[in-house]
């Protein structure tokens, strides 16, 4: 019976089967869930993300404040957009990352995934708070008020509370594993709010304009404003990866210290 193997002078040669190829891909994924390998990889990536953040932030702020033109209707106040819009994008991106990491942690018990979700929560909360504050500052001259309870603003506020709830639940139990599981479940349930934020301007009548960058027909915003907006978005994204890698590295080191202390206590 042919079992898919061949013989050679050096011994049996095993052919790749489809399942084995998938297993190889899974092993690559599993390899970087190992804290030691993660520490090795992240040590190489952190300086690159830090440098990219500084360069993109400097370039983005220059283009946003000096090189881009004022809007013909909003005037100079449109420059708030270059912080507000990327912050709002990152608020949703961070929550999506947190939900995915939580799902991986709940299903496969990957410690690095659980640490990534925990590390992402405060970063996402800061981006969401920044989006709310800059949106309020932008809304006052445009709408004549600091706040309105429309669908987009309310759903982003709910996102902010979800971040706070995740962080509170993570630390609400004496057993850290129980807190991680409970917070992970909250992250997955709360993910339903992300598409609500994205499509709220299409589903309901809101003060926010429809999407002008990520849309089927292509961006409607002029390139003189689109380029600085995308550069700032790149800076915020690199900042996220920089900080989350640093925070996960800190979590791994703290976990190792706790383990050493426990071994010393129990002799």
Image: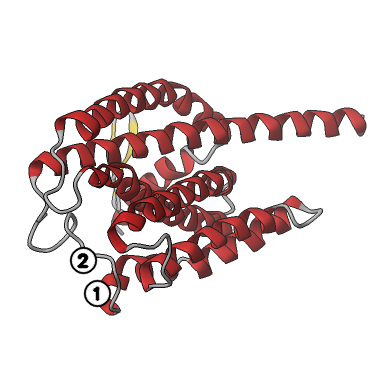
From this view, report whether residue 155 is shown above or below residue 38. below
Q: Position of residue 11 (x, y in %)?
A: 35, 33
> From the viewer's perspective, is 146 left or right of 254?
left
Whether the residues at callouts 2 and 1 have beta carbons within 8 Å, the answer is: yes
Q: Position of residue 245 (x, y in %)?
A: 49, 33
Q: Along the polypeptide, which appears first: circle 2 or circle 1?
A: 1
Q: Position of residue 50 (x, y in %)?
A: 40, 24
Q: Residue at x 52, y 50 (%)?
A: 125
Q: Label for residue 210?
A: 2
Q: Residue at x 28, y 47 (%)?
A: 81
Q: Nearer the viewer, residue 77 or 26?
A: 77
Measure the C-alpha gap from mark 2 to mark 1.
Answer: 7 Å
> From the viewer's perspective, is 208 left or right of 112?
left
Read off the residue under disc 1.
Answer: 202
Q: Quadrant of residue 69?
A: top left
Q: Nearer the viewer, residue 171 or 236?
A: 236
Q: Residue at x 92, y 34 (%)?
A: 266
Q: Position of residue 73 (x, y in %)?
A: 15, 54
Badge 1: residue crowd in 10 Å (few <14, some 14–19, many ≥20): few
Q: On the rendered image, what quadrant is the N terminus found in?
A: bottom left
Q: On the rendered image, what quadrant is the C terminus found in?
A: top right
Residue 50 seen in this snapshot? yes
Q: Nearer the viewer, residue 259 or 156?
A: 156
């Amino acid at each position: 019976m042919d079992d898919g193997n061949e013989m050679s002078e050096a011994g049996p040669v095993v052919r790749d089967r489809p399942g084995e190829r998938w297993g190889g891909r899974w092993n690559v994924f599993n390899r970087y869930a190992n804290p030691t390998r993660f520490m090795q990889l992240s040590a190489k990536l952190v300086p690159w993300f830090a440098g990219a953040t500084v360069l993109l932030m400097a370039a983005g702020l220059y283009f946003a404040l000096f090189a881009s033109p004022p809007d013909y209707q909003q005037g100079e106040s449109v420059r708030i957009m270059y912080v507000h819009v990327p912050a709002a994008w990152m608020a949703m991106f961070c929550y999506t990352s947190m939900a995915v990491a939580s799902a991986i942690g709940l299903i496969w018990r990957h410690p690095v995934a659980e640490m990534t979700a925990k590390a992402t929560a405060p970063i996402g909360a800061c981006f969401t708070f920044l989006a709310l504050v800059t949106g309020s500052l932008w809304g006052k001259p445009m709408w004549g008020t600091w706040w309105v309870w429309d669908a987009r603003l309310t759903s982003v506020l709910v996102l902010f509370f979800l971040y706070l709830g995740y962080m509170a639940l993570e630390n609400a139990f004496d057993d850290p594993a129980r807190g991680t599981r409970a917070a992970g479940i909250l992250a997955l349930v709360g993910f339903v709010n992300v598409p609500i934020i994205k499509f709220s301007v299409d589903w309901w009548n809101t003060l926010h304009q429809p999407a002008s960058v990520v849309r089927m027909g292509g961006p409607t915003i002029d390139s003189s404003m689109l380029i600085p907006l995308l550069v700032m978005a790149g800076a915020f994204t690199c900042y996220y990866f920089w900080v989350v890698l640093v925070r996960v590295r800190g979590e791994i080191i703290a976990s190792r210290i706790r383990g050493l202390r426990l071994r010393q206590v129990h002799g």
